[in-house]
Each structure stands twice: as C-alpha cells, then as structure tokens.
Image (cartoon, rainbow, N blue to C red):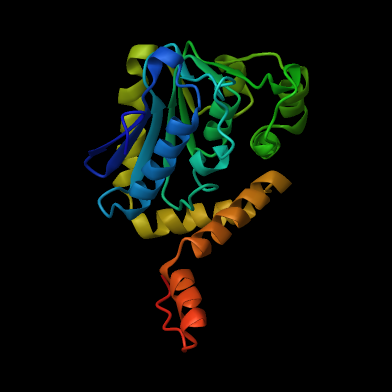
Amino acid sequence: MSDAVTYALDGHVAVITMNKPDKMNRLDPELVDGLHLAWKRFMADDAARVAVLTGAGEKAFSAGADLNNVPHNLYQAIPSIGVPIDKPVVGAVAGWCIGGGMVLTTMCDILICADNTTFSYPEVKIAFSGGLIANLASRIPHKIAMELLLVGDNMPVQRAYEVGYVNKVVPVADLMPTAMDWAKRIAETAPMPSRMIKRFVSDAMPKGSTEQAAIARVQVEDINDSSDWIEGRAAFKEKRPPVFKGE
C-alpha cells in the first residue's frame, strides 16, 4: 500500500481512502494501483466485513482520470471488476464526483453523500471514455442516465437522490459518521447471507461489454500471474509432468 490510498480497519469495517486531496483525488496510475491493492487486502482481511470507500478532503471524492497522467488500467481500481468483491461496499462521497470517480460509485452497494456533492460524466465533451460507465443505466432510469452521459451536464446530489442513485444526503460534517453507522449496522448482520445476497444481486445486474471484458481480463491475468503458469513452463522445458497446486 502507498500513501495514495490508505486502508484502516475500524472493528469489522475497512475504510479505504483515496488520499490525494491536493489533486482532487484524480485517478492516476499510483492511485489506481493503490485501490487495486486495497480491494485485494479487503477481500483477504477476515476481520473486514464491509468497506467504506471515500476520498480525502471535502472538495472532491474524485475528479476522475488525471488527463496529464491517464491510467490505462482503470478497471483494476473498480471493485467487483478489477477485483472480485462479494462483501458490501458503502460509498461516502463529498464534493465533485467526476468520470472514473463516478464509475467507482456505480459499484458501491450503498451511497451516502454530502450536500455539496455533484456528479458529472463529461467525457463526451473531451472525446474520452473507457465505457465502464455504461452500467449506470442499470442503476438509475435509462433516460436519466443517458441525459448525464450524452449531454455531459452536472447532476446535483439532490437530483441523484430523487432518481434513486443516492441513499442519504447529509451535511459534510456528518458524512463519515453516517457512512460508518450504515457500514457498522451491515457488519453486525450475518456475513454469509450478506455476501451471498451481494453475489446473487451482482449476477442479476446487467453488465456492459467493457465491464464483461474487464472481468474476463482479470481472470486471465490471475492465471498468467499464477505459480501454476511458472510450473507449467518449467515442466515443459524440463520435459517432465507438471505438479500443479491450483495457485
């Protein structure tokens, strides 16, 4: 883990924080790698039952991809895409939530927002998009999603609440206490059915072509990074039967 993304455990709640407030938590390669490692740590952490994802500072949850240092592996930062996640994720959002930052929020199960939050996906205005945001159309009504994505105008937090994208809007000072309250209430429930329900809901949610491709790519990368792949090549060179361990 780097300082770009921090991971802290509070009881059974893992708090994952994008920690570049001076750059409005723009998604650069360092931050993407940090999120990828944080999600892996969350899944490997037996004590962590729920995650709260947030951004440091009140100005921005994330201002989206850093256009001066574009991460071409953004999918790796997205929970349930870059890393398979079957534990609940609560988003705690304040300030600007733009582009890739908004993609992160589409994969949260619960979304708590400060009253200064503004959502935006302006990629059509700069001829740039990775396509992962297509899943927004399965989170809010189709026409509302297309207005946001094709026109590129901002969506105030109250509008996001009205269309069912946000669970609760609170003053900035109450954001993390409220998000932690929701997360701890979820953590108090039985983890096995909680995780099962998340898996079933994930299976039921429509997935766009970019999301499906990213999920497939992650599974291929897992094989290419495995010790079995190293063993397979070694056995082939040494003309012996391989001893695979499934890892």
Identify the image quadrant of the C terminus: bottom left
Q: Is residue 137 left or right of residue 15?
A: right
Residue 190 location (% of width, % of height): 33, 55
Q: Residue at x 40, y 37 (%)?
A: 34
Q: Residue at x 48, y 30 (%)?
A: 111
Identify the image quadrant of the N terminus: top left
Give the mark count: 0
Does residue 148 lie above or below 82 as drawn? above
Q: Residue at x 56, y 52 (%)?
A: 201
Does residue 138 lie above or below 203 as drawn? above
Residue 148 location (% of width, % of height): 71, 22
Front-lying residue, 218 or 93: 218
Residue 202 location (% of width, % of height): 57, 52
Front-lying residue, 46 or 198: 46
Q: Is residue 25 left or right of residue 221?
A: left
Q: Residue at x 55, y 54 (%)?
A: 218
Q: Quadrant of residue 161?
A: top right
Does residue 242 lie above or below 35 as drawn? below
Residue 155 location (% of width, % of height): 63, 16
Does residue 74 lie above or below 22 as drawn? below
Front-lying residue, 148 or 197: 148
